[in-house]
Image (cartoon, rainbow, N blue to C red):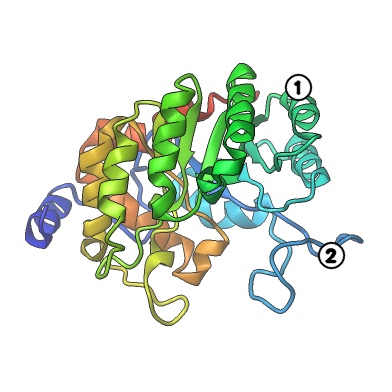
Amino acid sequence: MNRRQFLHAAAATAALPFTASATAAATRIVDTHTHFYDPSRPQGVPWPGKGTKLHRTVLPEDWLALAAPHGCRETVVVEASPWVEDNQWILDLAEKEKSIIGFVGHLDLGPEFAANLRRFAKNLIFRGIRWSSSLLLDTAKHAEVLAGAKLLAEHGLELDLNGPAAALPAAAQLASEVPELRIVINHLGAPGDPKSLRPEWRPAITAAAQKPNVYMKVSALVEQVKGVEGTSPRDTAYYLPILDHLWEQFGPDRLIYGSNWPVSDKGGPYDVVFGLVREFFTSKGTEACEKYFWKNAQAAYRWSERS
């Protein structure tokens, strides 16, 4: 889709990209990539680092203030902390915060991996874990990675992968080796700025998309842009080199909404982040919006509905 065709389609659907609309983008909207943490805890936090704009208390109420005006009141939290007990901190938070319908934990491979996974898998909010996809490139750890992936599948959990585009073929290989494991690629597969895409990204995306158990999270879109923090373009057409290729390869059934908030603030405010994907997927039709904003996420994360 070129810029002119996209703008024509967007106008025809009367999308309102950067403000709350009287008509929601879908009957349900689930943000599958948020981070919550509290640096004021006695133990502090290992991430984000002190002195950064992200080093502040970030809780569901803060996210809801930004997301709810767009019809988004449910989220799957992704843990960035390597501390094992921070998984429990989020699960305890979810007991009080019903907006948290799922949690992707952080568990490193090692002697305690299996025991830790069994412990947290008992909580239905715990839906999987996230690894750096660079781990898949370490041939010395292949057997350990494979065993861990099979254990996830046995528990009915999924695997989020975050890392460079160069690791996507390894993710595709893992998807073939453990076909019962649902894999969610984070942050577009790290394409780089839409105007200067990493050369390995397009073929790597094509390889990963060939595996039916691989999903793509359309998150960290504005963070791909090079330039002054918080000033990424608000023109959806700017991002079409990324969005069009993902649509062509993954189609309507395996693309998932995720904001990456509050890290997304590095590129632009939440209304911009939401507005860009709202405009793009609205141009694809009502059913595409339903799938992108929640149905595909439900298929990937398989959360239990909260009362």
Q: Position of residue 172 (x, y in %)?
A: 39, 35
Task: Answer with the quarter of the image where residue 290 lies.
Answer: top left
Task: Answer with the quarter of the image where residue 190 lies.
Answer: bottom left
215 to 58, vertically: above or below:
above
Pick the residue in front: 196 or 21: 196
Which residue is located at x 80 percent, y 35 percent? Answer: 111
Residue 122: mark in rendering:
1
Q: 127 left or right of 10?
A: right
- Please give the count of numbered marks on the rendered protein: 2
52 to 75, vertically: above or below:
below
Which residue is located at x 63 percent, y 26 percent? Answer: 147
Q: Are marks 2 and 1 in contact (CB under 8 Å)?
A: no
The amino acid sitting under disc 1 is: Lys
Q: Secondary structure at mark 2?
A: loop
Classed neighbour count for the residue bearing mark 2: other residues with Cα under 10 Å, few (<14), some (14–19), many (≥20): few
Which residue is located at x 55 percent, y 47 percent? Answer: 138
Residue, disc 2 = 40
Classed neighbour count for the residue bearing mark 1: other residues with Cα under 10 Å, few (<14), some (14–19), many (≥20): few
Q: Position of residue 15 (x, y in %)?
A: 24, 52
* C-alpha distance separating marks 2 and 1: 29 Å
The amino acid sitting under disc 2 is: Ser
Residue 154: mark in rendering:
none
Q: Tell me which label, 2 or 1, sits earlier in the chain.
A: 2
61 to 295, vertically: above or below:
below
Of circles 2 and 1, which is in front?
1
Pick the residue in front: 102 or 189: 189
Q: 179 left or right of 233?
A: right
Q: Position of residue 271 (x, y in %)?
A: 43, 61
267 to 136, vertically: above or below:
below
Residue 15 in view: no
Which residue is located at x 40 percent, y 77 percent? Answer: 231
